[in-house]
Image (spheres, helix red, strand yellow):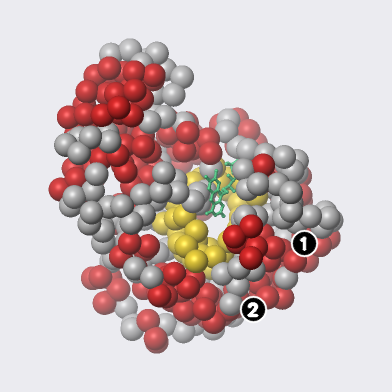
């Protein structure tokens, strides 16, 4: 359910004022030896993973309501698309999304540097390089997880990207690919990118099989090895290390945070938005709110998008799981699934769905 290209009107919220207050992008050149300031430690404790077709701008705006301090990531955008594509559509985001990172795909250092420069000028707080996606399409383009085999190329890319922007450049990677299942090889990869100026890595704590497994299977079948990520932090304490993969429970995440700097949550955050809120309450001192209050807090954003001509179905799909496992959850979902595709669907539909669910919501 990709809504790209289907919106009647693109949402464009580049931070023009801020961008114009900065030096022209061409002049934004910092030495890779000068590290960009890192985001605050509490922000790094909880992030929502980049997820293609899921973490679009409407989703991120909703997640921001749920988790006021979490670091949010865009879907992966190929560097060439950033340079040549429709930037309003690919890069536009709402100011409420900060802190928000742009995830890039690609492997050509010069192209990635240019795309990073553009992303930073649009106001992204971080530029992240995808070295974890195992899809065939991505491999054919020689980016994503197959780059785990090419640490020198990734290092060159990171160096070029870091030199082009004044925000952190980070890498999201796996533990290895295919037969590469050696902690020393993984460490050498991380050392190579750290040596190029990357101060933070996000590790999806399993390897990927480039042949024979679908991307979905590659998120489930290779075993999780959290101990490798903990060991990385132990052995490279100055590196900021975020752990990702299969995290759901607050207790588990808190246990990981004794070993690493932050936890990145993907599927559990998307399918169970209230879980994301609970994590934000536990890890980032967000004020606890009811499901109903959270959805109502999202209404002004929804209203603004509707008034720009965005169809409700592109927004409502991201909130379907809000009452997951609650007595009214099924009714909530059903009202939205049936009503949102209608051309005249608006806020009243969300109200109706809430009325179905809220009366049974636990206090
Ligand atoms: C639908 C979907 C799309 C994804 N797209 C991306 C992506 O664009 N870039 C990326 O680095 N990882 C992507 N991932 C992987 C997630 O970022 C994350 O690493 C993975 O889901 C493991 O975390 P989890 O177990 O908390 O979901 C995607 C995952 C899903 C489920």
What residue did someone put label 1 on? 187
Q: Could you tell me residue 103's position as x and y percent?
A: 50, 61
Query: Which residue occupies 49% across, 37% down?
Result: 269
The residue most toward the bottom is: 27
**Is disc 2 placed on a helix, strand or loop?**
helix
Query: Which residue occupies 42% across, 75% down?
Result: 83
Which quadrant, please, contains the N terminus?
top left
Q: Could you tell me residue 183's position as x and y percent?
A: 82, 56
Tell me which corner region of the image, top left, top right, bottom left or bottom right, holds residue 23: bottom left
Q: Earlier in the sequence, mark 2 or mark 1?
A: 2
Q: Is residue 46 above or below residue 83?
A: above
Q: Nearest the camera: 147 or 167?
A: 147
What residue did someone put label 2 on? 156
Q: Could you tell me residue 130's position as x and y percent?
A: 58, 61
**Is disc 1 placed on a helix, strand or loop?**
helix
Query: Which residue occupies 26% across, 58% down?
Result: 10
Residue 209 seen by the camera: yes
Q: Nearest the camera: 163 or 336?
A: 336
Tell me which corner region of the image, top left, top right, bottom left or bottom right, holds residue 86: bottom left
Picture mark count: 2
């Amino acid at each position: 359910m990709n809504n790209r290209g289907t919106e009647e009107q693109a949402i464009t919220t580049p931070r023009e004022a801020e961008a114009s207050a900065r030096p022209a992008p061409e002049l934004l050149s910092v030495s890779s030896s000068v590290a960009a300031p890192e985001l605050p430690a509490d922000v790094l404790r909880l992030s929502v993973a980049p997820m293609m077709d899921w973490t679009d701008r409407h989703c991120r705006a909703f997640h921001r309501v749920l988790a006021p301090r979490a670091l949010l990531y865009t879907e992966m955008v190929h560097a060439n698309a950033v340079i040549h594509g429709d930037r309003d559509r690919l890069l536009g985001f709402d100011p409420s999304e900060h802190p928000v990172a742009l995830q890039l795909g690609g492997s050509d250092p010069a192209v990635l540097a240019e795309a990073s420069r553009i992303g930073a000028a649009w106001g992204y707080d971080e530029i992240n390089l995808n070295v974890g996606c195992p899809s065939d399409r991505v491999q054919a383009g020689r980016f994503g997880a197959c780059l785990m085999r090419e640490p020198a190329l990734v290092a060159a890319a990171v160096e070029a990207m870091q030199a082009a922007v004044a925000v952190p450049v980070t890498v999201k990677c796996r533990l290895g690919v295919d037969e590469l299942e050696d902690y020393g090889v993984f460490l050498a990869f991380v050392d190579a990118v750290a040596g190029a100026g990357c101060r933070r890595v996000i590790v999806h704590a399993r390897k990927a099989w480039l042949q024979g497994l679908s991307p979905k299977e590659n998120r489930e079948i290779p075993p999780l090895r959290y101990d490798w990520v903990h060991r990385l932090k132990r052995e490279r304490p100055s590196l900021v290390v975020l752990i990702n993969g299969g995290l759901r429970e607050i207790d588990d995440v808190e246990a990981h945070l004794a070993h690493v700097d932050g936890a990145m949550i993907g599927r559990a955050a998307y399918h169970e938005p209230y879980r994301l809120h609970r994590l934000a309450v536990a890890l980032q001192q967000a004020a606890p709110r009811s499901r109903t209050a959270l959805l109502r807090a999202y209404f002004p954003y929804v209203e603004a998008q509707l008034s720009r001509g965005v169809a409700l179905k592109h927004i409502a799909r991201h909130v379907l799981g809000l009452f997951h496992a609650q007595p009214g959850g099924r009714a909530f979902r059903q009202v939205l699934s049936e009503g949102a595709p209608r051309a005249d669907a608006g806020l009243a539909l969300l109200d109706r769905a809430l009325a179905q669910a809220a009366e049974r919501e636990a206090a």
